[in-house]
Each structure stands twice: as C-alpha cells, then as structure tokens.
C-alpha cells in the first residue's frame, strides 16, 4: 500500500476562527498523505478539529469567521488551497465527494431529494434530466431506500435521520469521485444497513480505486475498514499508524485512553464506563505545549513547556509525545 | 431492584402514526406511510427501555408521538396514569417539564440565532424555574455536567462541533429535571470518552432522581450497557422485547439475530475476516408493507405461512415477548 502514489498531499494546514473573545485555534498544522485507493480513518476527540480540517481543504467553511492561516493541499498537480470558489466548485461533488457530518445542514429543506441527487450529475457529468433522475433512483436503491422512485419527490423532513444520511452518501457517490471525504457518515444507521453501506464502499474502492478519508468515532468501523488511522487531539494529529499496529500497540497516552473506554458485547454489563478525566483543551490559547498534557498521567515538565512534533517511532508509526511508550523513557 | 415493585410510568397501547401520501395540486391522499403501526409497551418508573431497529423503522416517530409532538393516528399513551391524548393544550403544557426529548438531529432543536446560554435557559424561563444569577449558575452547571466549558454561554451553536452541539441539546433536556426523557440517538455524534461521560451522567441522574429513559440507539454495545429491557422494532412494529441479558444471550427473532451479528468489533484482525449475516431480499416500504410478517421478505428462515399471516405478539417466557411464527 505504501508504494502507491499519493492522490492528496496535505501539508501544514492551520485554520482558526475569529470570535468575540479572540481566535479559536481549531487546526494547528495538520499534514497527511492519502494514497490512491487507500482508506484513511480519522478518529479523535469531539471538537479536536476533524471536520474543520477536511472542510478547510475544500473551503467549505464560512470565511470569515474562518481563516486558513497556512498550508497546501495537492490534488492532481493543483493546490486546492489556492483555488478560487469557481474552480473549487468544479471539483467539489465531482472528483472529490464530501459527506457532511450533519445531513440537515447540507440538505436543502425546500428542495426535493430527487433534485438534490440529480443536480451534481447534471453539472459534473452533463447528464440529461431524465438520465439523472433514473440514476438517482438507482443510487437511492443502492443505499437501501425502498420504493426509491416514488421517494425522489419527498423533502428531507419526510425522511428519517438515517435515510437522510444515506441520501448524503448517495449524492457523494453519484459522480464516481476519486477522493471521498466522509465525515461521520454512518452514525444514524443501524448495524445491518451500516454493514451494507460499508460493503458498497469497499466495492467502489476496489472497482474505481477511490481513495477515502473516513472520520468516525466508531472504532469498530475503523477496525474493519481502514488501512491507516490518524488520531486527532486539540487540532493536531497526535498519532498515525497502520490499523493493526495502532490497535495492537497504541503509543500516545490519548490513544491508549481512547481504546480503553470502549463498551462491548461481552463482560459485565453493569460496569461503569471509563472516560478520560479532565477537560478538553481551551482552543483560545495558541498551543505552545502538548495539548493533552493537563490530562495525561505520563506528563512531565517538558510536556508543559514544549509541544512535541509528530515523528516516526517504529515502522510507519508516527507519534507526537515526549514520553516513549516502548521504553518508558522521557525524551 | 425487582421490577414487580416499580409502578408503570408510561403505558403505550396500539400506537399508530400514519403520514398521508398526497398527490397533485389538490393534495389528494393516495396512501399512507405507516411509520408506526401498532406498538404497545410499558416503561416502569426508574427503568431504561432501549429501543433499537433498522433505520427508518419508526423509532423517532414513535418518540415524537409519545410526547404528543405529533398527533397519533390511533392508540393510547398514558403517563402516570393520565391519558396524554385527552389533555388540552394548557394541561399538556403543564406536563411538558416532566417529559423531555433529546433530538436525533441537534439542528432540529437548536435555534441558530440564540446563544447557548439562552437555548439552555429557555425551558427554565418558560416554566418560571430559577431567577437571575441562580438561573445563570444553573445553566453553567448544566454545561459543565455535559463536559463543556462554563464560559461557552455567550456563543452560538455554529461555533461548535457536531458532538458539542449534541451535548447542548442534552443540557437543555435535563434543565428542568424531568422525570422521563426520550433520548433519540443522544450519543451517536460523540467520541467514546465523551459518550461514556454522558452515559455515566444519565445513569447518575437516574440513580439520584429515579429518572426514566426511553433510549433509542443504533449502538448495541451501549444499549446492552444502559438498558434494563430492550424493544426491537422492524418496519413500524415491535418484533421482540425482553431484558437485556436475555436479548443478547438468546435472541429469538431472526431480525434480532441478524442485527446482533452485524455489530462491528474493535479488533482489526477479527473484523477484516468476519462474515456477517447481511440481509438480502427486498427492503419493504412502510407505505406498502408486505402481507403477513413484515420481515418475511428478508428473513432467512421464512416459510409459507410467514408470507400470509401476521405473527401474533406473544409471551414465550415471562417477560420475553416475540412476534414470530417460528419461535
Ligand atoms: N464557526 C466557528 N466559530 C468558532 N469556533 C468554531 C467554529 N466552528 C468550529 N469551531 C471550533 O473548532 C473546533 C473544531 O471543530 P470540529 O467541528 O472540526 O470538531 P470535530 O473534531 O469534527 O468534532 P466532532 O467529533 O464533535 O464533530 C471545535 O472546538 C469548535 O468549537
Ligand atoms: N413528517 C413525515 N412525513 C412523511 N413521512 C415521514 C415523516 N417523518 C418520518 N416519515 C417516514 O416514517 C418512517 C419512519 O421514520 P423515523 O424517523 O421514525 O425512523 P427511525 O426509526 O427514527 O429511523 P432512523 O434510525 O434512520 O432515525 C420513514 O419511512 C420516514 O420516511
Ligand atoms: Mg465533526
Ligand atoms: Mg430516528
């Protein structure tokens, strides 16, 4: 997998928001490489900047208050960050598909589901109205919505939470994207329909060589889908490794804590759930030290003074931590 | 706590909600989406009833009809012995503080033009609870209890991440210390650590104040943890209902069995090679449910009679109800 060419190279993206009481430093220098046909899982704390990072790449954030302070994102010899809105519009929903976390914010409540599905195909693929409608019904059926043809005339509020989410998935897949960015795409789906959707995605990856960024809180889904996983905390990637390696040998104390908090289908059901103590970082402060240090049981002086950068520690395994989990050494 | 001693808090009988399907400019009714098609269950005081089922099977609609946010097509809902459907507007308003809902889509319930502080204090104001600095203190305390910073009261919903918005909705729902909360996918948007924090909070409130929950979720591991009993819904009907222990160890309905086999496991070695029961066959529509058993079109074990007769809802063991011909 690592010998594959990259399709998206993201370097040093920083995004902040201007608010009444100063800047919110949401994303602080994120870099990653997405290979052709690869599935990169992105996990991390709620509020850690997963959505903002990905929305920055396609300028899907309201600017202002959002500002992209630095960074490049190379896709097919172009830097997405430098493109203007018109140029980006040609890529969004075409070569790069995007599934938003919140279907209600991205589906237009006054347009029918059928219109919203057909529109990108008419724009990016030049489909006729009839052809686009026919394909829309096929896509709805593909994501498991019965009597798809008649439901094209419905409005979003007539669909259940999970059905809206599946509409978003269908829209994102409509134009056979080269890169699919999926932000929590299956949170509203039951496990059987989720399994069905995951199967479709696996198939499209194989057939079309689609590369995917999959943001999720579901570590079970990551385990079954991802080649590589990036873990985010406080606007940084704090760990990145191939999926098996990450689960077997997590090196960052935040990742270790995260893997410990999972409830499961066996064992004592009444046991109180474990959570990571303490508060998430205050993003109003420009991060000068390790963002996890105040909650970290391994933290020592240096962690409160300097922010560790993401470095290789083991084969393809990157960590941003002053404490070496393998040797117990404080670096 | 033995369940026999607990009084029934909420009783649902034969509840139906059909949405009309209309056609043409005169909006002539040509059919109905039978989103909820005759469900019955009790929830005891202080218990958590889990509600699981396929996406689109009617869980959120059931929640809304129970709280009278939608009017029912048929059936009865009584809360502490009071028939909610017979109440007039004012009497219903008086019941509202006791019954709350955490909505699946935080967008549905958070007004984008209001600050977080006013969103959470709105129910307090509406029902005249707490005044002045006490109210402010209560709001900040609520924010903290859902794992958020006290200082966030002056911000607007769009300034928050998906998971943070969901927690604002939770803080609002618990503001009036209700007796009964319908939690519609309250934790789907949260990371596992904050999920644990929120679930622990809900359990603490339950312990302390005897709160009762209807907990709708797709997360079967979390349902197993939080629910005393679980109802499994399929296409507008409940197909199985029993205590958590029994449901997870000996599920009886073929749909429950398929559901449990598909839970993702957080172990990549295991997960990559796993075979799930992926349901095949036609996904039926609630506008046109199959005759006989609703699950028959996809059931791996369906026989002739499953396609013809609707299975009866019966008790196979004390406290374990199933609707299936083959059990
Ligand atoms: N418009 C805005 N103004 C100010 N702050 C913002 C704005 N939008 C997002 N943020 C902040 O940026 C941070 C990152 O948000 P983001 O949505 O990327 O989080 P996330 O990792 O996707 O979280 P979740 O898992 O909850 O979706 C959050 O702390 C959020 O409060
Ligand atoms: N306002 C409405 N008008 C028409 N049909 C509706 C309306 N609300 C819901 N429905 C339909 O009723 C059915 C049940 O929807 P509901 O939202 O209750 O499902 P759900 O079980 O909560 O699903 P999910 O797990 O995806 O949230 C769906 O087929 C949906 O399309
Ligand atoms: Mg997000
Ligand atoms: Mg729902």
Image (cartoon, coloured by chain):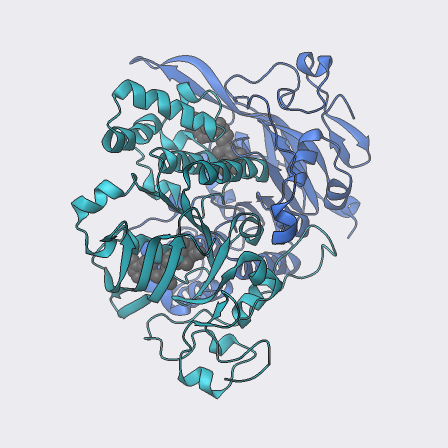
Chain colours: A cyan, B blue
Residue B229 seen anywhere in this rendered image of the structure: yes
Q: Give the residue drawn at x 68%, y 17%.
A: B310
Left or right: residue A6 versus residue B6 is: left
Closer-to-camera residue (A47/B313)? A47
- Percent position of residue A25, x then y: 32, 68
**Extreme residue in the bottom direction:** A301
Closer-to-camera residue (A37/B209)? A37
Q: Give the residue drawn at x 72%, y 13%.
A: B305
Q: Is residue A312 above or below residue A261?
A: below
Residue B160 seen anywhere in this rendered image of the structure: no
Left or right: residue B226 versus residue A136 is: right
- Percent position of residue A328, x then y: 59, 81
Left or right: residue B205 versus residue B321 is: left
- Percent position of residue B73, x then y: 52, 23
**Extreme residue in the front direction:** A3
Q: Is residue A2 above or below residue A195?
A: below
Q: Is residue B115 above or below residue B256?
A: below
In the rendered image, which quarter is residue A81 located in?
bottom left
Question: How many numbered dots are placed on residues in this image?
Answer: 0
Closer-to-camera residue (A75/B154)? A75
Q: Give the residue drawn at x 33%, y 22%.
A: A133
In the rendered image, which quarter is residue B267 located in?
bottom right
């Amino acid at each position: 997998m690592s010998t594959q060419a990259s399709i998206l190279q993201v370097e040093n993206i920083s995004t902040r928001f201007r608010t009444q009481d100063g800047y919110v430093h949401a994303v602080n220098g994120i870099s990653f490489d997405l290979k052709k046909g690869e599935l990169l899982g992105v996990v991390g704390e709620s509020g850690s900047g997963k959505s903002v990072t990905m929305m920055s790449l396609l300028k899907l954030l309201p600017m202002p208050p959002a500002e992209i302070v630095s960074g490049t994102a190379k896709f097919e010899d172009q830097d997405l960050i430098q493109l203007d809105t018109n140029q980006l519009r040609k890529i969004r929903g075409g070569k790069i598909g995007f599934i938003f976390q919140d279907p209600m914010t991205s589906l237009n409540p006054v347009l029918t589901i059928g219109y919203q599905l057909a529109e990108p195909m008419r724009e990016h693929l030049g489909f006729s109205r009839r052809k686009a409608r026919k394909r829309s019904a096929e896509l709805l059926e593909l994501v498991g919505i019965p009597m798809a043809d008649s439901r094209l005339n419905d409005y979003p509020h007539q669909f259940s939470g999970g059905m809206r989410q599946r509409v978003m998935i269908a829209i994102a897949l409509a134009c056979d994207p080269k890169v699919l960015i999926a932000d929590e795409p299956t949170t509203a789906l039951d496990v059987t329909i989720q399994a069905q959707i995951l199967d479709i995605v696996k198939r499209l990856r194989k057939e079309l060589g689609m590369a995917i960024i999959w943001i999720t809180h579901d570590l079970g889904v990551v385990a079954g889908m991802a080649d590589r996983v990036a873990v985010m905390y406080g606007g940084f990637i704090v760990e990145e490794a191939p999926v098996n390696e990450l689960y077997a040998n997590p090196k960052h104390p935040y990742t270790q804590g995260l893997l410990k908090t999972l409830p499961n289908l066996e064992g004592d059901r009444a046991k109180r759930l474990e959570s990571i103590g303490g508060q998430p970082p205050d993003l109003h402060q420009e991060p000068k030290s390790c963002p996890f240090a105040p909650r970290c049981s391994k933290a020592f002086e240096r962690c409160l003074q300097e922010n560790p950068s993401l470095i290789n520690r083991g084969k393809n395994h990157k960590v941003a931590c002053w404490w070496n989990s393998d040797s117990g050494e404080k670096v | 706590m033995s369940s026999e001693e607990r009084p029934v808090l909420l009783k649902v009988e034969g509840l139906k909600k059909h949405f009309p399907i209309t056609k043409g400019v005169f909006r002539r009714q040509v059919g109905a989406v039978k989103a909820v098609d005759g469900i019955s269950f009790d929830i005891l005081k202080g218990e958590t009833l889990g509600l699981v089922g396929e996406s689109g099977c009617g869980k959120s609609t059931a929640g809304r009809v129970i709280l009278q946010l939608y009017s029912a097509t048929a059936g009865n809902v009584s809360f502490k012995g009071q028939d909610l459907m017979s109440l007039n507007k004012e009497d219903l308003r008086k019941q509202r503080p006791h019954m709350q809902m955490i909505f699946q889509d935080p967008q549905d319930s958070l007004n984008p033009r209001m600050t977080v502080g006013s969103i959470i204090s709105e129910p307090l104001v509406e029902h005249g609870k707490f005044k002045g600095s006490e109210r402010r203190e209560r709001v900040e305390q609520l924010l903290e209890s859902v794992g958020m910073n006290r200082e966030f009261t002056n911000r607007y919903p769009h300034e928050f991440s998906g998971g943070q918005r969901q927690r604002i909705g939770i803080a609002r729902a618990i503001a009036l210390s209700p007796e009964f909360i319908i939690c519609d996918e309250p934790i789907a948007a949260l990371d596992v650590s904050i999920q644990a924090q929120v679930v622990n909070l809900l359990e603490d409130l339950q312990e302390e104040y005897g709160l009762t929950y209807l907990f709708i979720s797709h997360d079967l591991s979390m349902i197993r943890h939080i629910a005393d009993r679980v109802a499994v819904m399929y296409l507008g009907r409940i197909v199985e209902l029993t205590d958590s222990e029994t449901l997870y160890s000996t599920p009886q309905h073929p749909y429950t069995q398929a559901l449990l086999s598909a839970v993702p496991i957080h172990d990549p070695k295991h997960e990559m090679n796993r075979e799930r029961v992926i349901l095949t066959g036609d996904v039926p529509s609630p506008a046109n449910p199959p005759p006989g058993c609703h699950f028959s079109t996809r059931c791996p074990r369906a026989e002739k009679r499953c396609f013809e007769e609707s299975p009866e809802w019966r008790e196979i063991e004390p406290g374990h109800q199933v609707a299936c011909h083959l059990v």
